[in-house]
Amino acid sequence: MLSKEIQDLYKKFRLMNYRGLFGRIRERDGSLSATEAYAADVIYLLEEPTITRLAETLGISQPNATYKVNNLVAKGYVTKTVSEGDKRECRLGLSEKFYSYYNASTQFIDRAVESLQEQFSPEELRLFGKMLGALAQAVE
């Protein structure tokens, strides 16, 4: 039973994410394609990866990852910072332009939390937060 509720919640989160993603993709200069939006999201999820780590995570070649990253840099969504120790390596960061794009897609979570706060006590919410933390650790 609990597994079904978690799967249903996961499906709803995915649908909300896709709805937000595709709602913001526009065919004009500087906008992100679906592939670019996903690549930027993976950079966000990996928290300042190298291009090699991005390529490995996406299961693509390093030249392909470099091409995607360079497009995201050119459009102003991603930044590259050269590593102090190894000048051949760079860390990928995200710009304010990305965060304004990304934050628009997570507003549904804020609305859901507000709804929970109206329905449940602080103690119930604390316990729920503890359970979510345990769930997040269990899937790592």
Image (tube, rainbow, N blue to C red):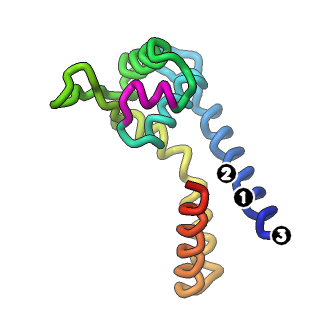
Q: Amino acid at mark 1?
A: Leu
Q: Residues within 10 Å of mark 1 (few under 14, many from 20)?
A: few
**Amino acid type indicated by mark 3:** Met
Relative vertical location of residue 135 with respect to residue 25 in this rendering, above or below = below
Q: Which of the two discs, 1 and 3, sits closer to the camera?
A: 3
Q: Residue at x 62, y 40 (%)?
A: 20
Sequence-wise first label, 2 or 3: 3
Q: CA distance from mark 1 to mark 2?
A: 6 Å
Query: Would you place residue 127 above or below residue 54 in this image?
Result: below
**Residue drawn 31% across and 31% down?**
91
Q: Position of residue 19 (x, y in %)?
A: 68, 39
Give the distance between the C-alpha atoms of the residues marked 1 and 3, in whole angstroms. Answer: 13 Å
Amino acid at dot 2: Phe
Q: Position of residue 55 (x, y in %)?
A: 48, 25
Q: Hey, which quadrant is residue 138 in on the image?
A: bottom right
Label 2 Cα crowd, 10 Å radius (few <14 / some 14-19 / many 20+): some
Mark 3 Cα-neighbour bin, 10 Å: few <14, some 14–19, many ≥20: few
- Percent position of residue 7, x then y: 76, 56
The disc placed on residue 13 is: 2
Label 2 secondary element: helix
Looking at the rendered structure, which numbered label has been put on residue 130?
A: none
As rendered, which of 47 and 120 lies closer to the eye? 47
The reply to whether callout 1 and callout 2 are in contact (CB within 8 Å) is yes
Q: Which residue is mark 3?
A: 1
Q: Residue visible at 55% across and 54% down?
A: 140
Q: Is residue 108 rendered to the left or right of residue 45? A: right
Q: Is residue 54 magenta?
A: yes
Quadrant where the N terminus is found in the figure: bottom right
Q: Which residue is mark 1?
A: 9
Range drawn in magenta = 49-56
